Image (cartoon, helix red, strand yellow):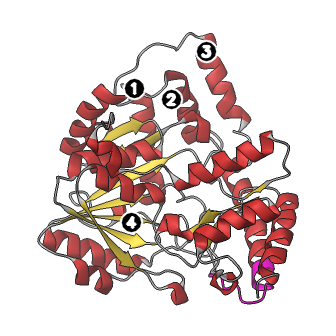
Amino acid sequence: MNVLAERNAWISESSTMKVAAEAGRLKREGVDVVDFSAGEPDFPTPANIKNAAIEALNKNFTKYTPISGTPELKQAICDFHKSSYGTTYKPNECIVTVGGKHAIFNLTQVLLNPGDECIIPVPYWVTYKDVVNYCQAKCVFLDTNEAEGFTLTAAAVEKVITPKTKMIIINSPSNPSGAVFDRKEMEKVLELAKKHNFWILTDECYDRFLYDAERYSLASFEGAKERVVVAGSLSKTYAMTGWRIGFVLAPADVAAGINKLQSHATSNPTSIAQKAAYEALTGPQESVAGMLGEYTKRREYVLARLRAIPGVKVQDPKGAFYAYPNVSTAFKNGVTDSMTFAEKLLAEEHVAVVPGEAFGTNDHIRISYATSMEELARGLDRIEKFIKARV
């Protein structure tokens, strides 16, 4: 007898979390592991944000808040998005969620019906596939152009649109590739969404971490408001991964649907974390620039080191904090794909990376450079040794 509900089989365990858990287990056993798996800033949450949480505790701000978030935080989110991109969202078009992942889950749950099709560019963040499957909708995977930095074109999108297309998920900057999609191409995708009546879910988790690309939001395009929904997060931007604060910006009726769903799932996000989030958005922003400066240095170092390894190819990430090298040159001597590469790398050299299989490609691994230069040097030494033994 299968004790679990059938829908539990529609989803899989997060591959990134699984790798991080295995790396953590080895560390607890005393193994010297270099962990490049987690997409988590190594910086502390800025002091002003932590102090806002402490003040909230001292003032006993520990009760329920409105399901969709405090009015002041919702207004701050709308104001910040307006100042960044020129959008005009109102608080009734904003929902504060328990992290960015929760925002994406909520949006897919209220917008997708069983049998609907959702276009997902490849490579994709691991959760997209599973949340779409959980809706009993169909994932339509769309390959991007690796030789041109995993770019996506409107012409490619148009080829896979059918009468069942209900949504496309755009993640720019992208996890895992760091790709930033061309603004003009995304404007054309919006025109396709209007013509064929489907939603664009834009995941803006990494929108503040750009290197040599234009910063924009699809939600700022003319006529976007009725076709575009935004999933945002404070986790990466302010090194607040454990605080679990994200948000949705969407038409009022979509926001109302999410409010109803959230009322039975989590109720409100943590009251104290909401006070911290308000300070993050309205307080000093120097910490973001500081983190981006460090990521820029690390990016250049990682790319140079990877390109010095025989046979390894890697595209320039235009944003986020990941490198996504093609390591298929090392698929020899017991390594047959990205999964066995990652498994053997962890077992033999004690370096944790996420296999590209988790993101829809099989020739790549994802390396997070949200860690110190010392750890990057140690880990890349080991990766170089591992690959050179096989080429």
Asked which secondary structure carries label 4, the reply is strand
For marks 1 and 3 on the same chain, the one whose residue lies earlier in the sequence: 3
Q: Earlier in the sequence, mark 1 or mark 2?
A: 1
Per the rendering, the mark at residue 57 is: 3
Give the x, y percent position of residue 199: 24, 61
The amino acid sitting under disc 2 is: Gln
Helix, strand or loop at disc 2? helix
Q: Nearer the viewer, mark 4 or mark 3?
A: 4
Residue type at numbered disc 4: Ile
Q: Which residue is mark 4?
A: 170
Q: CA distance from mark 4 to mark 3?
A: 37 Å
Tell me if label 1 and label 2 are in contact, CB under 8 Å: yes
The CA distance from mark 3 to mark 2 is 12 Å
- Residue type indicated by callout 3: Leu
Question: How many residues crowd mark 4 within 10 Å: few (<14), some (14–19), many (20+)?
Answer: many
| Residue topped by disc 1 | 268
The residue depicted at 74 percent of the width and 48 percent of the height is 42
Secondary structure at numbered mark 3: helix
Whether 314 is among the magenta residues is yes
Q: Which mark is residue 247?
A: none
What residue sits right under mark 2 in the picture?
274
Q: Find the magenta span and give its range.
A: 305-315
- Label 1 to label 4: alpha-carbon separation: 27 Å
Q: Is residue 231 left or right of residue 21?
A: left
Question: Neighbour class for label 2 at 10 Å: few (<14), some, many (≥20)?
Answer: many
Q: Could you tell me which quadrant the C terminus lies in?
A: bottom right
Q: Is residue 386 within the magenta segment?
A: no
Q: Residue at x 45, y 75 (%)?
A: 181
- Contact flag, marks 1 and 3 (Cβ < 8 Å): no
Of helix, strand and loop, which mostly describes the magenta segment?
Answer: loop
Query: Within 10 Å of the Cα at label 3, are there few (<14), some (14-19), or many (20+) other Cα atoms?
Result: some
- What type is the residue that disc 1 sits on? Asn
